[in-house]
Structures are given as C-alpha cells and as structure tokens.
Image: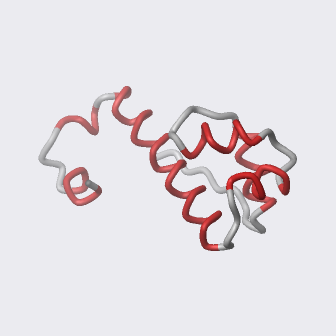
C-alpha cells in the first residue's frame, strides 16, 4: 500500500478523510508491532500503561485516540512518542 501511495499515481492522498484513516491504521500497526516485539499481550500493555484494556484494543483496531493516551503507551513500551505533520 505504501508503494501505491508513494508512487503518487492516485489522488486519494489528497483527500483529508483518506489521510486521517491512513494515519489511524498506521498508528494501530505501530502500536501493535511495538507491543508484540516486547512480547506483551494487549492486557499486559494496558496494565503497564495504566489504561483500560478496551483503549488498547480500540487503538489497535484503528480507532482515533488522544495524544496523552499514545504517550502513555509509548512510555510503557520504553519508547518516545514522535508525531510528524508533513
């Protein structure tokens, strides 16, 4: 998918709705990958980040979340939260 978007052959990337959904999916994948790399279950990450399990599940399903929550998850994973707006 990234190659398709990077190729610039489609105007979807100009659509704000598409950009938002793509960002949510990218966040979900990043959180899931970092969690799995540390061998944590969703429940273990939720406990470590002091968040409800439902919040971690929603984030990994691509639901929108607030920066404070993402920051707590990053901290629980020993990571820093970095947000780039291009």
Give coordinates of residue 62: x percent, y percent: 51, 39
* Residue 78 position (above or below residue 21): below
- Of residues 17 and 59, which is closer to you in this image? 59
Please report the residue visible at 17 percent of the width from the left and 56 percent of the height from the top: 7
Please report the residue visible at 47 percent of the width from the left and 50 percent of the height from the top: 26
Please report the residue visible at 60 percent of the width from the left and 37 percent of the height from the top: 58
Q: Is residue 43 left or right of residue 31?
A: right
Give coordinates of residue 74: x percent, y percent: 73, 57
Please report the residue visible at 68 percent of the width from the left and 53 percent of the height from the top: 42
Q: What quarter of the picture does the N terminus occupy?
A: bottom left
* Visual colour scheme: secondary structure
Q: Is residue 26 left or right of residue 15?
A: right
Quadrant location of residue 59?
top right
> Looking at the image, how many numbered discs can be counted on the residues?
0
* Residue 32 position (above or below residue 11): below
Q: Is residue 7 left or right of residue 39?
A: left
Quadrant location of residue 64?
top right
* Residue 35 position (above or below residue 67): below
Q: Is residue 86 left or right of residue 75?
A: left
Give coordinates of residue 6: x percent, y percent: 24, 56
Give coordinates of residue 73: x percent, y percent: 74, 53
* Residue 3 position (above or below residue 38): above
Quadrant location of residue 25?
top left
């Amino acid at each position: 998918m990234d190659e398709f978007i990077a190729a610039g052959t489609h105007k979807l990337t100009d659509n704000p709705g598409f950009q938002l959904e793509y960002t949510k999916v990218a966040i979900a994948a990043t959180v899931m990958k970092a969690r799995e790399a540390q061998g944590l279950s969703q429940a273990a990450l939720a406990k470590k980040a002091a968040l409800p399990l439902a919040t971690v599940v929603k984030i990994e399903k691509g639901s929108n979340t607030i920066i404070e929550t993402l920051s707590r998850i990053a901290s629980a994973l020993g990571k820093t939260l970095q947000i780039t707006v291009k």
